[in-house]
Every structure is written in C-alpha cells, then in structure tokens.
Image (cartoon, rainbow, N blue to C red):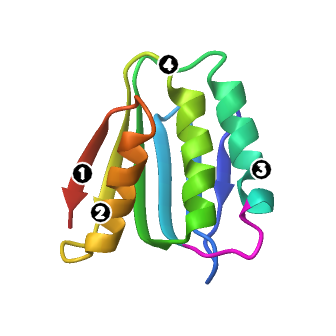
Amino acid sequence: MQKLEINSTDLTPSVLLDADNRIFKFEGRSVSDNPKDFFKPIHAWFKEYSKKPNAVTVIVARFEYIDTATQRELLDIIKTLEGLPDVKIVWQFLEDDEDMEECGQELVQLTSVPFEFQAY
C-alpha cells in the first residue's frame, strides 16, 4: 500500500501513514478552516488500509491542539478502525495539557478502539 505523507503547516498537522513500515502518526496542530478537505485523503487511505490491515496497528496521535471539527474527523477515522485486529491509539499530550488529555478521553468514550495515554 502506498505511503501517505503530509507536511505540517501552521493550521494542519503532519501525517505519516506507512503500512509497510508500520508507522501511523499525526503530529502538530489542527485548526484548519476546512478540516474535511484536509482529512479526505486520510479517510480514503484508512478505508483502503482496513481492507488488508497489518496484524498490529498502532496509531500515534501527538497533537499540540485540535479543534472540535478535527476531533470529529478523528472519530470518523477511529471508527473505520474498530473492526481491525489488534489496533490501538497512543494519545500523546504535554504533561500539563489537561485539555488535550480530555480530548483523548472524550474519543475513548465514543469508540471501542483502545487508547494508551502518554504524557511527555
């Protein structure tokens, strides 16, 4: 499966989705005016990936900040992964950033995919 790599901007996170090397990573800020456009290729990539997933899928989400529209887009992506074997989200947040930790906790309540929380 082809790798998807998106560089970060002031409004969007960097994204690296590389099934061959088992790297699934989001990092940065996401406050785009149109998150649907930004996340469209990411949704498509995960839909294709879910047809023939790796035995283990660990997605690392290391956001400095995300808005509620991004949170909805992430939830849609996570729901795509619910049926996959051995999938997990590693939610990383700054040690004193309660808002980002709570954001991850809200996603946990809306999906059956397990989360691991890591403060850095």
Tag 1 secondary structure: strand
Q: Tell me, yes or no, whether the two marked residues, 3 and 2, touch with CB atoms within 8 Å.
A: no
Asked if residue 1 can be seen in this view, the reply is no
Q: Is residue 60 above or below residue 31?
A: above
Asked if residue 119 can be seen in this view, the reply is yes
Q: Which residue is mark 1?
A: 117
Q: Position of residue 51 (x, y in %)?
A: 66, 17
Task: Specify start and end residues of the magenta stretch as a single range.
Answer: 30-35
Q: Is residue 31 above or below residue 87?
A: below
In the rendered structure, find residue 101 and report the number of the disc placed on it.
2
Cα distance, mark 1 to mark 3? 26 Å
Q: Which residue is mark 3?
A: 40
Instruction: Work out whether mark 3 precedes mark 2 in sequence or the reverse, and give the earlier one.
Output: 3
Cα distance, mark 1 to mark 2? 8 Å
Q: Tell me, yes or no, whether the two marked residues, 1 and 2, touch with CB atoms within 8 Å.
A: yes
Mark 3 is on which residue type? Lys
Tag 4 secondary structure: loop
Q: Which residue is mark 4?
A: 84
Q: Is residue 79 left or right of residue 22?
A: right
Cα distance, mark 4 to mark 3? 20 Å
Name the front one of labels 3 and 2: 2
Q: Is residue 97 left or right of residue 36?
A: left
Cα distance, mark 3 to mark 2? 25 Å
Q: Is residue 71 above or below residue 88?
A: below
- Judged by its main secondary structure, the magenta piece is loop
Mark 2 is on which residue type? Glu
Instruction: Work out whether mark 1 precedes mark 2 in sequence or the reverse, and give the earlier one.
Output: 2
Q: Residue at x 27, y 75 (%)?
A: 97
Relative to the observer, which residue lies in front, 61 or 3?
61
Q: Residues within 10 Å of mark 4 (few under 14, many from 20)?
A: some
Q: Quadrant of residue 118?
A: bottom left
